[in-house]
Amino acid sequence: MSANPPNGDFRDDDATREWSTGDGEAGSHDLTEAGLFEVSQGESADDVLEVHDRLGDYEIKSLLGSGGMGQVFLAEHVRMQRTVALKTLPVHRLGDAKAIERFFSEVRAASRVMHPNIVTAFDAGEQDGVPYLAMEYVDGKTLTQIVSEGGPLTVGDAADVIRQAALGLLHAHRAGVVHRDVKPGNLMRTTDGTVKVLDLGLAQISSLAVDAIRPSAKTDAVSSTADAKSGKHGDGKTAGKQRSRGKRRPGKLIGTLSFMSPEQLEDPESIDSRSDIYSLGATLYFLLTGRTPYPGEFLDQVYGHRHGEIPDLMQIRDDVDMNFANVFRRMMAKSPGARYNSLDEVIEDLAGYVASEAAPSWLQQLAPMQAIAQDSSTIIGGSTYGGESTVARRTEIVGLDLGMFDLAAASTDLSGSLRNLTPGELGQPLFRMVMTGSDGTMRFGDVATQRQSTNPDQVIRCLPMYFGQPTIGRQVCGRNCPPEVLMGAMIRRAMRQAWNRKQPPEAVAITVPSVYDQLHRRSIMQSATIAGLRSVRLVDRSLACVQLMMMQHQCGGTASAPTDDNPLVLDDPAESEPMPGDESRHVLFVGLTGQACEAVVVRCENGRLEQLGASGHWNHGTLIWIQRLVDLAAEMYSRSIDLDPRKTLRRAARLQTACERAIQSLIMLPSVKITIEAASHPVSVVVDRMQWMLRCEDLIDQVTKHIRQACERASIRPDQLDHVVGLGPLLRMPELKKRIFAGVPAAANVTMADRHDVACGAAICLSGELPGRGDIPMPPRNVASQQIGVLVEDAQGRSRILPIIPRGTILPARTNRRISAGKQKESLTLSLVESSGPLGKHWQSLGQYDFDLDLANDSSAKRARMIGFEVDINGLLTVRAQTPGVPGSNKLPSLPKPAIDESDLAGWIQWLNEQPVE
């Protein structure tokens, strides 16, 4: 009955077909296709139970179909006049005690669940030795049939189907029922759009059902070795259709191989609800592609489920964004511990992608289709790309390179065309990250900078250095403000200068150092929320910079055609060689900026970037280098005029400003004159560049150590690097450049980037994550630069740290761990830590969670919690706790705690809106 649709991408071969013809007539009401039972093509007429007019209280209308484990009739309850599907055992099974027990196991499983997204069991009974089960009659088609007839679904339609199925399965899981055979043929969409989960014939009722639920015609075992050699498998049909009359032997399969989880291949009797999540993920892949994730013969499929690479939906469909692709990857993680812990998390993450027109009306009324987001500044699928129409609206993305001293901005559309948003000449900062507000009016940029020499105590700058503190210690417009509020004010001011449109951009990429920890990343996200940015993505600065450099090299030195008289070209194109995008290349990024010193090794393979290793620290940036120059100049002043400018705030501020300007000259000149006002007249000293470098020997060693450690973490030697990208003015000094890159091969290309390059690269990285991205490169893969761990006690009561998310793990990363309390403990405390220090050898506390225990029940299950740890694509940690014995999880408060409590955030935003700005 299967017919290939016109869509050539759909394949309905033996590896994907989930149903076959039977005695029943095909059609939208054919329960054979619905998966309510399976039809054996060798079924004889004698196998069909002869039921004349009545079975119990049900009047038989017609035979819908029959199979090895059941036959289904269209029937009507004589008193209620309700149409039902009546399932019975076939003739040859009526004398089989195990088949009868298996039938009533299905009855018991069905009796436990009643949900709009599960086929309802109305009644069960027995008459004249014939057991029967009366079920809801479903008017619709299976997903197999829908895809076969119409081809793969849209993203919004597929999200709706999977989300509805997840709602039904979550209800079953909470009732202690694991389906064990989730597949397109066991999901039916009715005429009103409701998705129904069918066939609990293989369901397992908690751990008590192991003996009750035994193999039947549907679960009968087939040898995974001998039959594979004979070529009997790999057809995607339910394992067990080839009936074995004996007991189930070790090595037998229960379920449908094409959609079976790796752990179900190992031991189908001991799986839990996470196995259904995997199978639902495989079903999602089928809906979007018309194929199973791992096609082929039996052994090919087994290997694919166990060891095969999870398919990348972004490479298969250009209307899939990275967030949606990551939802799919978490559903199909090989290890249950790396998978979603519960379907309620899947339901939440898919909500924003559901096409509103696809959902049934009852579900729209029950739960409006909107993105469930705790943090409004995070990109959520529904708020940006949920339906087809939203893709067209997302035409331009802004990239911000947020630095310690200045900010640069650029934009791109989905065609990859770049536009520099800097109002002045290329190379000039868009916005000076300086502000003042001592007189009740907020002033920014150059206006605020002018006050640095006269009123330094009124000027606010270098805000990232204040992250982690409750306030900056200076009043702005009459209030002591958290640094995140003032950073938000600066970002908002910069965006208003750069973005001259009424509506804010749909998405903004903000760069951060790759080595930023949880505290700094959360502070940046909260600042973006205060700035009024709707959808924000944190992009590692290393990836943004290398991404643009790669595109520039491929375009012969230009990332895009010149626009607005601001062509985006390489800083030193004559020094560079082409960087091939179709070969594997290892690129070293070294950033020495105000925010951090970082070294990151990036691999470029087939045009896609992936971080391999990172090292550095946010406290090793250029501020220390500037301070060394300030100290050197101050000592020279003390010797020449017996005056230490650091002893008064005003002179210290003037010296600081003069040294910051002098560094720009020291990049090109061997010496520079530093002048400040002293005793009512200017006084100058001449600083030699090599003198300064001698003062910074330890800092140079730190940079080289970070480079070595980044290479070690990437499992590569420095002499194997193909290209080097540097960011930061200090790296342009010939002596420093030579020292730092001494271990890099002479043949390696060295390219120096500027802030505008990074802003452009950030915009390109984000645009690559979106649907409709055209020829824009696939988004880079970033890794966890810090380790996340928990503090635990061993049997002797000694504390130790158990790493949870190792450094170098590709993001997003997920793991589930069961955390237990000691027998003498009255509560369970979960303490989280994060690696810290310049080389990541130390740990810092993120905070702790406390859980009350059931002291009346001393069982180990009651004294434990299943905890889900996830670091998302922004590098932010989310923790979920599952209630013991109950599927479902609760999202715990963020750690470390946000600098500004959510209840106070709206108040600060309102206060900021009320302040006058000049």
Image (cartoon, rainbow, N blue to C red):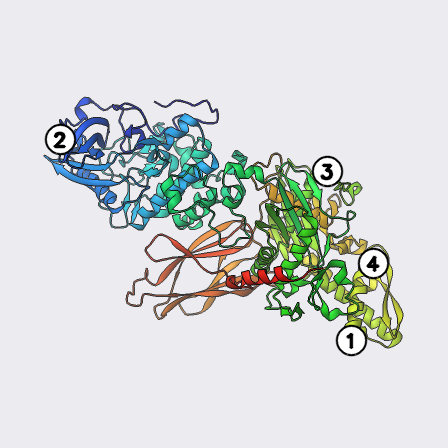
Q: Are marks 1 and 4 in contact (CB under 8 Å)?
A: no
Q: In the picture, residue 34 is in which quadrant?
A: top left
Q: Are marks 1 and 2 in contact (CB under 8 Å)?
A: no
Disc on res. 648: 1
Compare marks 3 and 4 and give the one earlier in the sequence: 3
- Going 47% across and 61% down the picture, which residue do you hit? 893
Q: In the picture, residue 161 is in which quadrant?
A: top left
Mark 4 element type = helix
The Cα atoms of the two marked residues, 2 and 4, are separated by 98 Å
Residue 839 percent across, percent down from the top left? 62, 60
**Left or right of 658 in this view: 603:** left
Of the residues shown, which amino acid type is indicated by label 2? Arg
- Going 52% across and 34% down the picture, which residue do you hit? 317
Classed neighbour count for the residue bearing mark 1: other residues with Cα under 10 Å, few (<14), some (14–19), many (≥20): few
Q: Are marks 2 and 4 in contact (CB under 8 Å)?
A: no
Residue 721 percent across, percent down from the top left? 68, 46
Disc on res. 836: none
Q: How many marks?
A: 4
Q: In the picture, residue 297 is in which quadrant?
A: top left
Q: Is residue 821 above or below residue 28?
A: below
Disc on res. 54: 2
The Cα atoms of the two marked residues, 3 and 1, are separated by 52 Å
**Left or right of 156 in this view: 212:** left
Q: Which residue is mark 4?
A: 666
Compare marks 2 and 4 and give the one earlier in the sequence: 2
Of the residues shown, which amino acid type is indicated by label 1? Thr
Of the residues shown, which amino acid type is indicated by label 4? Leu
Classed neighbour count for the residue bearing mark 3: other residues with Cα under 10 Å, few (<14), some (14–19), many (≥20): some
Q: Which residue is mark 3?
A: 578
Answer yes or no: is residue 238 visible.
yes
Mark 1 element type = loop
The Cα atoms of the two marked residues, 1 and 4, are separated by 26 Å
